[in-house]
Amino acid sequence: MGCGARARQSGVMSAKRESPRLYGRQAECERLAKLVDGVRDGGSAVLVVHGGPGTGKTALLDFTATLDTGLRVVRVSSAESETELAFGGLHRLCGTMLDLVARLPGPQREALEIAFGVRAGTGPDRFLAGLAVLGLLAESAADHPLVCVIDDAHWLDQASRRALGFAARRLSTEPLLLLFAVPEPIKDLGSLPTMPLGGLRDADARDLLASVLRCPIDDRVRDQILAEAGGTPGALLGLLHEVSPAQLAGGFGLPDMLPGSTSEVLFAELSELPPETRQLLLLAAADPTGDPALLWQAAAQLGITGEAAIPAAEAGLITFGSRVVFRDHAVRSTAYRVARLRERRSAHRALAQATDACADPDRRAWHQAKALTGLDEDVAAELERAAASPPRPRSSKPLPRRRRMRRGGQKEASPPLRSCFRRANPAPQRSCST
Ligand SMILES: Nc1ncnc2c1ncn2[C@@H]1O[C@H](COP(=O)(O)OP(=O)(O)O)[C@@H](O)[C@H]1O
Ligand SMILES: [Mg+2]
């Protein structure tokens, strides 16, 4: 069950607005809702949510901010460009509380006014600045229970981070929740309670994927996407963002569809690998199923031995096990993109040769098509035949599930696929090499 649904059911966590459904984060949502309940009852709390990019930190902060509690929510999201502006983050967070500064004791008021540029003076004392922030938040919470949400707190300027960390460690009886999100624990927020976010469990990741896909997907491609996303919701959704469900229905063209976020660092890392290793990575990237038997058969056709795998595996770029899994989609995408066109063609040719023509005619035809300069009519015909093959008579043995899914999806995928080939290759050549 997703968090949104649970929130609506329990009543405790009912949301003001319809927040997107969060898969596999029930425990986290419940913990956050309890903290908010505690603040409503007059208590204070602090929590640092940490997890890598795309694990859903912002989504959980959104969830908290939209809980229908009647609490006031003040929210600030930091940006890398502001890390140099001393007290800039704090100024944005406290922007709506400035009229309360007058209630603070003189030295604290002075420290805050200097920090916010209202009064001339040298950089305020760290201790006084921290006390002043604590005082200001407490005053604000005394007027109305308060939830402060500070996203990407690692990008706060250091002065703000220190002052907020100082205040967070000294909360006592104010009806106030301080909620931070950071990719990994940071010193200025050290010793505060944390909530680490890992990847989603496989079943939850599958549910999330199913929720965004509207048509059948090849089982093997789905498993491969899930394996490489490693349960990170952002990675799953990012991959599918630029791809329509219809495009994925056949599940063939994964490498071409990946978002083109090739970083220079990754590009350089891959370029420095031995040529055979790069070729092996290219083969793996061109096969969206992650099937090791297929990969090594294709590799053998190109004269690539198991030795080639070692540098890539040692660098943690890819894992060769019962499934071939790239570290993430960026590595797969880059391995494909850095290759020259002729290298890609020979990779697809080898994969076509290694693909069983009876068990997997559609994928074989797809590899064949990718291996050609222009459109080969035989290949186009194979694609079309695979798409149009009539359903088997009722009496015949049912197709294995995997094959049924591929066929179901392909009926939608192949006509546009073929028309794409035709548009891209107005003067087809006959040069099938398999
Ligand atoms: N548990 C989840 N279920 C469904 N979608 C999620 C979940 N967690 C995150 N998302 C979605 O994944 C994407 C990335 O999440 P985000 O919160 O921005 O990650 P982070 O802040 O950790 O980088 C967003 O589109 C978000 O809505
Ligand atoms: Mg975020």
Image (cartoon, rainbow, N blue to C red):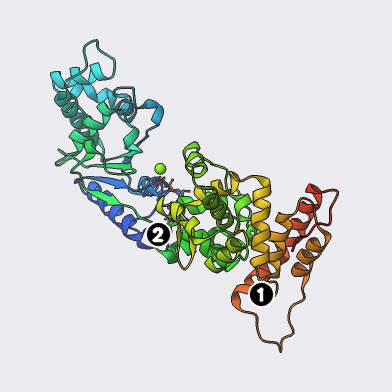
Q: Amino acid at mark 1?
A: Ala
Residue closer to the observer: 159 or 128: 159
Q: Is residue 247 visible?
A: no
Residue depicted at 45% across the width and 65% down the height = 321
Residue depicted at 81% across the width and 64% down the height = 381
Residue 46: percent from left, percent from top: 23, 44
Answer whether labels 1 and 2 touch (C-beta < 8 Å).
no
In the rendered view of the protein, which quadrant contains the C terminus?
Answer: bottom right
Residue closer to the observer: 15 or 348: 348
Q: Secondary structure at mark 2?
A: loop
Q: Is residue 431 above or below residue 169?
A: below
Q: Is residue 106 left or right of residue 335?
A: left
Q: Residues within 10 Å of mark 2 (few under 14, many from 20)?
A: many
Q: In whole angstroms, how far apart are the C-alphas of marks 1 and 2?
A: 33 Å
Within 8 Å of ligand 1, the CB of disc 2? yes
Q: Residue 359 bears which disc, if any?
A: 1
Residue 431: percent from left, percent from top: 80, 57
Q: Is residue 135 left or right of residue 211?
A: left
Q: Is residue 412 visible?
A: yes
Q: Residue furthest top?
A: 120
Q: Is residue 338 left or right of residue 138?
A: right
Q: Which residue is mark 2?
A: 200
Which of the two discs, 1 and 2, sits closer to the camera? 1
Q: Residue furthest right?
A: 427
Residue 57: percent from left, percent from top: 37, 47
Q: Amino acid at mark 2?
A: Leu
Residue depicted at 71% across the width and 55% down the height = 371
Within 8 Å of ligand 1, the CB of disc 1? no
